[in-house]
Amino acid sequence: MLYTVMPLELVLEDRTVAEKALFETTYLGRRVISRIGPSGQMEIVRLLSTDPQDYLDPRLCPGAFMLRQ
């Protein structure tokens, strides 16, 4: 028995399909994991930081696109 609020398609999706390539890089002085988004820009997937203040910065949240520096 599986109790979840997530759609069944997400829970049982095929995870053998290769994930898009992920890159570890530095953005705004912070380490982030990113991938190439649908528009061709780099999209932040994960923030790697021990500073709680970094997680409040909307420029570093998952789903945000990295602007060229």
Image (cartoon, rainbow, N blue to C red):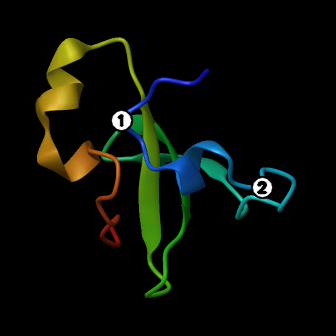
Report how far apart the C-alphas of labels 1 and 2 lie in the structure.
Answer: 19 Å
Lower position in the chain sequence, tag 1 or tag 2: 1
Q: Residue 64: image x %, image y %?
A: 29, 59
Query: 48 left or right of 35?
Result: left
Name above or below for residue 3 compared with residue 11: above
Quadrant, the C terminus: bottom left
**Which residue does the numbered mark 1 point to in the structure image?**
5
Query: 7 left or right of 22?
Result: left
Name above or below for residue 26 compared with residue 69: above
Q: Amino acid at mark 2?
A: Asp
Q: Is there a contact, CB below 8 Å, between mark 1 and mark 2?
A: no
Along the line of sight, the residue nearer the viewer: 21 or 1: 1
In the orientation shown, which residue stands out farthest toward the front? Answer: 1
Of labels 1 and 2, the one closer to you: 1
Along the line of sight, the residue nearer the viewer: 4 or 14: 4
Residue 14's disc number: 2
Name the residue located 20 percent from the left edge and 51 percent from the top edge.
59
Secondary structure category for the residue under label 2: loop
Q: Residue 63: image x %, image y %?
A: 33, 57
Query: 55 left or right of 16?
Result: left
In the orientation shown, which residue stands out farthest toward the bottom? Answer: 39
Name above or below for residue 40 compared with residue 7: below
Name the residue located 68 percent from the left edge and 47 percent from the top edge.
12
Residue 20's disc number: none
